[in-house]
Image (tube, rainbow, N blue to C red):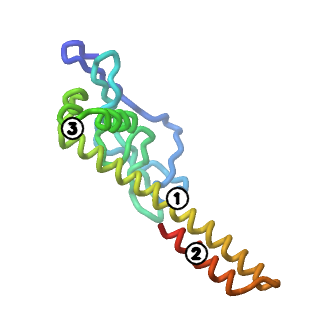
Amino acid sequence: LDVEKQRVDIQVEHARQAKWCCPVCQKQVGLYDHAEERTWRHLDSCQFQTFLRARIPRLACPEHGIRNATLPWGERGSRFTLLMESLIINVLQQCQTIQGACRLLGITWDEAMGVVTRAVRRGQARKQQRRQECHDWFHANCLQCLGLSLSGGSPREARRLCEALDRLSVR
């Protein structure tokens, strides 16, 4: 706690017996070493800026090599915790200007734009995942329609339905 600078620093460490998974294949792997200490801005505590400090564990995966562990509080490449990024997005949505939001949050314009870029990337990834799930569902139902058509229904109608479902799933 630094009252003069109005800052709280929290040192984060893991337990010695912690278990690790490769961020690529999710297989349990061993600890290799730790990266240099990094700092993430977190939600303010009693009007004091709060920062998490940690050395990211590096993992040894036989298949993917040495990789940084996935952290529960932050996204790769970000200097903010996920909770702070969420607050930044909410404030940006409510303010009339980016500069006004930056003044309220005590961040730079570049930091705000980095948060927006990561939020858009996460949203696009979620949208793509939902699109794929929808596509898979439509194709499964389309195959059921074709199966029904082979058992006495009209193959032409089943094919038209399948094409219509496919067009819907691409949107």
Vertically, is 96 above or below 71?
Answer: above
Q: Amino acid at mark 1?
A: Arg
Whichever of callouts 2 and 3 sits on the residue coming sooner in the sequence is: 3
Q: CA distance from mark 2 to mark 1?
A: 19 Å
Q: Is residue 157 left or right of residue 53?
A: right
Disc 1 on helix, strand or loop?
helix
Pointer 3 local density, CA inside 10 Å: few below 14, some 14–19, many at least 20 = some
Pointer 1 local density, CA inside 10 Å: few below 14, some 14–19, many at least 20 = few
Q: Which residue is mark 3?
A: 98
Disc 3 on helix, strand or loop?
helix
**Front position in the image: 108 or 5:** 108
Whichever of callouts 3 and 1 sits on the residue coming sooner in the sequence is: 3
Q: Which label was assigned to residue 130?
A: 1
Q: Is residue 53 visible?
A: no
- Figure label count: 3
Kindly identify the residue that appears in the image at 57 percent across and 62 percent down.
133
Vertically, is 135 above or below 6?
Answer: below
Kindly identify the residue that appears in the image at 17 percent across and 35 percent down.
99
Q: Residue furthest top?
A: 3
Q: Position of residue 33 (x, y in %)?
A: 38, 47
Q: Is residue 46 visible?
A: yes
Q: Position of residue 40 (x, y in %)?
A: 31, 35
Pointer 2 local density, CA inside 10 Å: few below 14, some 14–19, many at least 20 = few
Q: Amino acid at mark 3?
A: Ile
**Front position in the image: 124 or 156:** 156
Q: CA distance from mark 2 to mark 3?
A: 43 Å
Q: Residue furthest right?
A: 152
**Which quarter shows the N terminus?**
top left
Q: Which residue is mark 2?
A: 164
**Residue 94's quadrant in the figure?**
top left
